[in-house]
Image (spheres, rainbow, N blue to C red):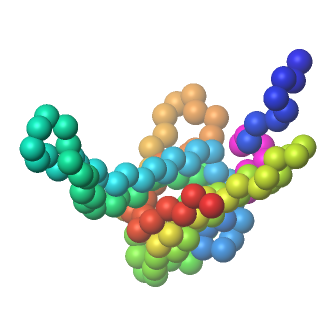
Amino acid sequence: MLVNGIEYSWSNAVFTVAGNVIAGISEIEYSDELEKVHNWGAGSAPVSRSYGKYEAKGSITLHSSEVERLTRVAPGGDIKAIPPFDITVTFAAQLGQLPVRHKLRSCEFMNNMRGMKQGDEKFDVKLDLIIAEIAWL
């Protein structure tokens, strides 16, 4: 029985990399962090707070066919040489939900590797990302 409706899910997500919709994706992870510290003064409680550096990071796991397609158009055949691009994750509105969009700005691939073992049904490639900023729209 549905109590509170429908949740955002993988099945209603759309992923774009550099403006192109990517269907061969099996996982994406992204996060950001802002350093925060207490400033101490008189007494035992902090008197203010300071903020440090902002850092965004993530990874994307693509089907090998998507990685090979990117490799074919990459400068020198190296996906690490692809100029910075945006990744957009959009969750379409479902039954009264509002659409949600997360924009990973100025991304680049950090690595290029392959790995597969006997028994694998598909060939996925996990690629680490360097991300300038995440807009949680």
The x and y percentages for residue 100 are: 70, 55
Q: Which residues are magenta?
A: 9-14
Query: Which quadrant would the C terminus be assigned to in this image?
Result: bottom right
Q: Residue at x 50, y 69 (%)?
A: 105
Please say if 40 is above or below 22: above
The x and y percentages for residue 49 are: 25, 52
Q: Is residue 32 magenta?
A: no
Query: Outermost residue, top direction?
Result: 1
The x and y percentages for residue 57 are: 40, 55
Q: Nearer the viewer, residue 18 or 114?
A: 18
Q: Residue at x 39, y 62 (%)?
A: 130
The x and y percentages for residue 79 are: 46, 69
Query: Outermost residue, front direction?
Result: 42
Residue 41 lies left or right of residue 22; in this view the side is left
Query: Which quadrant would the N terminus be assigned to in this image?
Result: top right
Place residue 23 in its image quadrant: bottom right
Q: Is residue 13 magenta?
A: yes
Q: Residue at x 13, y 46 (%)?
A: 40
Q: Residue at x 57, y 28 (%)?
A: 119
Q: Nearer the viewer, residue 126 or 49?
A: 49
Residue 28 lies left or right of residue 107; in this view the side is right
